[in-house]
Amino acid sequence: MLADILAVFNLGLIFMALRVTTPILFAALGGVISEQAGVVNVALEGLMLFSALIGLFVGVTFQSPWLGLLGAIVASLLLSLVFAFVTQTLKADEVVVGIAINVFAVGFTVFLMQEFGGDKGSYNPAHPVALPNVPIPWLNGVPGLGMIVNGPNGQGLNVMTYLSLLSVPLLTFFLYRTVFGLRLRSVGESPLAAASVGIRVIRMKYYAILLTGIFTGMAGAFMSMAYVNMFLRNMTAGRGFIALAAVLLGARKPWGTFLAALLFGFAEAISNMAQSLRLPSQLVTMFPYAVTIITLTWFSVRDYRRRQRREAAL
């Protein structure tokens, strides 16, 4: 048994971890943008789920994964626009609206599956579409790296995985090296100060929420057209909430959020690979969520102790 458990920890685990981290990272980076603008976007789960189904519908209809990706982004943008209007224009509570969108996404996707696929549990098209994997053959000659990038079967990482990794430095540059990013962060840090220098606070928050929608749309498209080539009821399975946890653990910064998302990705990858072992399925399934709870508890205790030391120093 011990030998079987140790066999899980190999280079193939890193490949799988990068793969399963992709939707979490996309959603988490979107969450970073909202948080930087002072918006608590709890709707990440619902945005991912809704865009996953709509993206697959569009992709299958036109037999193009790229149009499916575009459809997923547009679907997420539309739902994000609803979230922005209700929270920023109508001044409703962000957490309540986010939870409402999550519940709506679960119910509405089931309704759409029943209407267009005749099944409330899954939508498995006869002619599925898939976003392509991109193998890098010349890396096979590099010990270790070839296995990490191309996988055990040489299929390569998905194009969306590369895009998610590239998004981390790009978002860092956007937030900390552009005028727009400075304005967005100023709105989150001090709305009154930002308004006093002519920045339109509500408009900037709209922009941040819509940018979050783009990232969650890409996360949803990956789930239904790369992770698996079908849609399952509630297939996001809490990844939106895990992404939100990664944002908090990463101190609302792109690189910190990336490391936190990768940690949760490794936990899910270990859970997936451990399913082949003779372990209780319930124990294996709960592992990534247990890691999330333990990590957030550790983060909260650390943050609390830091505040206590600051107060004692004053």
Image (spheres, helix red, strand yellow):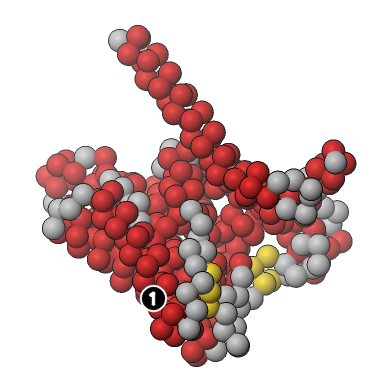
- Is 230 located above or below residue 49 in the figure? below
Q: Residue at x 20, y 55 (%)?
A: 87
Residue 310 percent across, percent down from the top left: 36, 15
Can you say which quadrant of the picture contains the C terminus?
top left
Q: Residue at x 77, y 62 (%)?
A: 151
Q: Which residue is mark 1?
A: 111
Residue 29 percent across, percent down from the top left: 45, 53
Residue 115 percent across, percent down from the top left: 41, 83
Q: Residue at x 36, y 59 (%)?
A: 102
Q: Taking 251 as reference, is 80 left or right?
A: left
**Quarter location, residue 312:** top left
Q: Taking 140 as reference, is 282 left or right?
A: left
Q: Residue at x 60, y 63 (%)?
A: 162
Residue 85 percent across, percent down from the top left: 20, 62
- Is 302 located above or below residue 117 in the figure? above
Q: Please, what secondary structure does the residue beneath circle 1 have?
A: helix
